[in-house]
């Protein structure tokens, strides 16, 4: 992935990117996926990714307006293959994932969905806003993270699958003690 | 959270002077507003603070913004390649002159009235200089306030204390151990990208202690790793290795061994060759059998080298992370976590090391997540009203004998799992805390961290 300055160049205004039924079906899928994740059904969630998937959360920094990039082209908070995601999930299933026991309660809110044609047939680029609320234990405090997702969704015989996901968070210094939940 | 000024030395710190040599530490030191205020005044104003790695600012004009407690510091390389650090505070009204955490600048122009400072700190431009000051302002006196800077093996440190001993003296021989992290070849190390930064309600001290060699926590906190088959070590041999500390200085390191591992296992061949070229025979003797090493430079800079892999049951590679436990307030830190890679290694090796580091450390790291779960909960509990009278158990290794023929400096012990180094760490810290500003910190006042018992059983 190229390093980038956010929000990059917007696509042309007023253009219908993809047929409405496809767009609606993609939105349906993303809401379903967010629900599966918030319900902590991690194995079912993992199934929603392609085998060659990648999942990246770049490091963001605070820079001057004219700097070349503020989303690092190299540094990643998460840079997972499907195998690595599998490790994270099998970790959660051990009795020793202390960070998530008792589990965090999360809500993923998705909005401002844009669907664009993908680079390959049957693939679509989906860009949208993300707001994650996380509550832990009996503490009155909570975490709130906002960001932008850039997904590539692929049409498969089983329905939509996520071929890549990039989550660009808005904070450069994250106000969370860990990211033991999925973004 | 707004820190307050110190209102005196809490009773439990006075008591700690007596109890620490017996292996007792008041729980309250791990989360207390007055302790934080005293640390600001007596520890962080006098110690050498880690600022940056030289590779973060490789070119003239490159800068990063860092902290010495609540003071923002610009760390910048000038046109001649020399590194400076300045307080990020305009000398006119105190406005912040640099607002980006990294970048390149020949000058900083204050956005309030336009005073302009060169990257060396000199005041160059003052709007309406002649008209409003009429010669009364001596520009040479009003540059950005310099922070004293010294470097070791690519690490840039700064101190607010103009009378501080040199960095070399301050490290006091611990360089012998730091070289394992910092000299994996003639080119040294470089950072892989900017640090990951995040905020946690945890006291910086518990983190600094943990990375001073808390091998005791690993088989429990990070049990998932053993469970899924990630470690070339089993719970039964995990305690083996060395624990070393620099008496009176607080620096401490744990070096874990696994019987039967080949020398320098887990390092790419280029790095093994590099270490043979840069490390002394004594250093090689200490580190060749290390499965991992984890150490802290007093007060709050730590390093860890350990093997890990992207999926379980692989041999794995040894990455290195450098971390700064920046105190933001009572019971709160801002984390800076870097991955250091050997500068001479091929890009593919650097990429692999970074990716492995990333699965283990950083806010989403599978190790780091669980550490922070413990550290935040512990800091909350130790902020409770009963914590001032509540002593924590620091007994491990009280009567151990140091190794006589150890090739490195400091006091060395075996095995690796022990709390001896932590008693020295907190003894050093307490010595700063109990020495008022203006008096010299006398390192000979730090009590020994162990009391070997002689043949007759007498201490
Ligand atoms: S505060 Fe900087 S010029 Fe006045
Ligand atoms: Fe740990």
Image: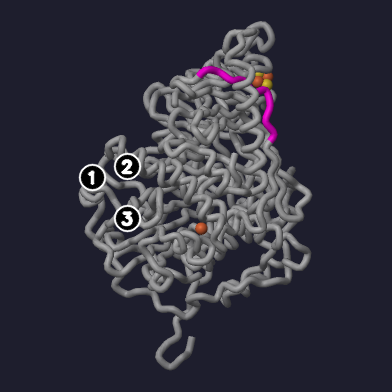
Question: In this orientation, does residue B58 appear?
Answer: yes
Q: Position of residue B60 (x, y in %)?
A: 40, 23
Q: State the CA–CA distance, disc 2 to disc 3.
A: 20 Å
The response on whether ligand 2 sits within 8 Å of label 2 is: no
Q: Residues within 10 Å of mark 1 (few under 14, many from 20)?
A: some
Q: Which residue is at a point 32% across and 55% down the rendered structure image?
A: B315
Which residue bears the numbered disc 2? B342
Q: Nearer the viewer, residue B355 or B455?
A: B355
Q: Looking at the image, do the residues carrying marks 1 and 2 touch, with CB atoms under 8 Å apart? A: yes
Q: Which residue is at a point 54% across and 33% down the rendered structure image?
A: A159
Q: Which region shows up in magenta?
A: A109-117
Which residue bears the numbered disc 1? B270
Q: Nearer the viewer, residue B442 or B203?
A: B203
The quarter of the picture where residue A102 lies is: bottom right
Between disc 3 and disc 1, the foreground one is 3
Instruction: Give me the chain letter of mark 2.
Output: B
Which residue bears the numbered disc 3? B315
């Amino acid at each position: 992935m190229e390093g980038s300055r956010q929000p990059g160049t917007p696509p042309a205004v007023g253009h219908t990117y993809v047929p409405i039924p496809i767009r609606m079906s993609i939105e349906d899928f993303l809401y379903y996926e967010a629900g599966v994740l918030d319900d902590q059904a991690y194995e079912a969630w993992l199934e929603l990714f392609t085998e060659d998937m990648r999942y990246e959360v770049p490091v963001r920094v605070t820079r001057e307006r004219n700097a070349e990039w503020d989303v690092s082209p190299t540094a990643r908070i998460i840079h997972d293959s499907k195998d690595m995601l599998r490790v994270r999930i099998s970790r959660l299933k051990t009795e020793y994932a202390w960070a998530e026991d008792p589990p965090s309660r999360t809500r993923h809110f998705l909005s401002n969905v844009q669907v664009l044609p993908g680079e390959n047939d049957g693939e679509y680029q989906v860009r949208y806003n993300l707001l994650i609320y996380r509550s832990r234990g009996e503490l009155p405090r909570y975490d709130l993270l906002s960001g932008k997702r850039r997904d590539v969704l692929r049409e498969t015989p089983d329905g939509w699958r996520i071929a890549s996901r990039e989550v660009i968070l808005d904070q450069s210094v994250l106000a969370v003690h860990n990211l033991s939940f999925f973004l | 959270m707004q820190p307050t000024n110190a209102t005196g030395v809490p009773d439990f710190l006075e008591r700690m002077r007596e109890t620490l040599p017996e292996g007792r530490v008041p729980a309250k030191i791990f989360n207390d507003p007055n302790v934080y205020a005293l640390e600001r005044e007596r520890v962080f104003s006098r110690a050498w603070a880690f600022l940056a790695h030289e590779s973060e600012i490789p070119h003239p004009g490159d800068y990063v913004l860092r902290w010495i407690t609540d003071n923002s510091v610009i760390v910048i390389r000038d046109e001649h390649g020399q590194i400076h650090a300045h307080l990020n505070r305009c000398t006119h009204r105190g406005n912040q002159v640099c607002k980006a955490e990294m970048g390149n600048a020949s000058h900083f122009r204050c956005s309030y009235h336009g005073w302009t400072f060169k990257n060396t700190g000199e005041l160059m431009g003052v709007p309406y200089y002649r008209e409003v000051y009429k010669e009364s302002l001596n520009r040479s006196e009003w540059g950005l306030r310099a922070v004293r800077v010294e470097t070791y093996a690519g690490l840039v440190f700064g101190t607010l204390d103009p009378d501080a001993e040199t960095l070399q003296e301050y490290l006091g021989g611990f360089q012998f151990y730091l070289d394992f992290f910092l000299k994996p070849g003639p080119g040294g190390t470089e950072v892989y990208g900017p640090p990951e930064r995040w905020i946690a309600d945890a006291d910086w001290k518990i983190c600094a202690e943990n990375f001073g060699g808390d091998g005791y926590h690993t088989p429990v906190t990070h049990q998932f790793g053993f469970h899924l088959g990630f470690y070339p070590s089993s719970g039964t041999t995990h305690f083996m290795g060395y624990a070393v500390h620099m008496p009176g200085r607080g620096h401490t390191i744990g070096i874990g061994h696994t019987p039967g591992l080949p020398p320098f296992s887990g390092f790419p061949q280029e790095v093994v060759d590099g270490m043979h070229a840069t490390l002394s025979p004594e250093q090689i003797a200490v580190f060749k059998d290390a499965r991992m090493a984890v150490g802290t430079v007093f007060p709050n800079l730590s390093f860890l080298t350990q093997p890990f892999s992207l999926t379980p049951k692989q041999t794995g590679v040894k990455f290195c992370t450098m971390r700064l436990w920046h105190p933001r307030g009572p019971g709160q830190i801002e984390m800076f976590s870097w991955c250091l890679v050997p500068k001479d290694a091929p890009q593919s090796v650097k990429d692999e090391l970074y990716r492995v580091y990333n699965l283990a450390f950083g806010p989403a790291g599978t190790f780091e997540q669980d550490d922070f779960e413990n550290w935040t909960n512990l800091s909350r509990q130790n902020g409770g009203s009963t914590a001032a009278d509540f002593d924590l158990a620091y007994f491990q290794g009280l009567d151990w004998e140091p190794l006589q023929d150890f090739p490195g400096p400091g006091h060395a012990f075996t095995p690796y799992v022990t709390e001896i180094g932590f008693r020295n760490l907190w003894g050093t810290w307490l010595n700063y805390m109990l020495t008022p500003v203006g008096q010299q910190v006398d390192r000979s006042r730090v009590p020994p961290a162990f009391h070997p018992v002689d043949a007759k059983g007498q201490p």
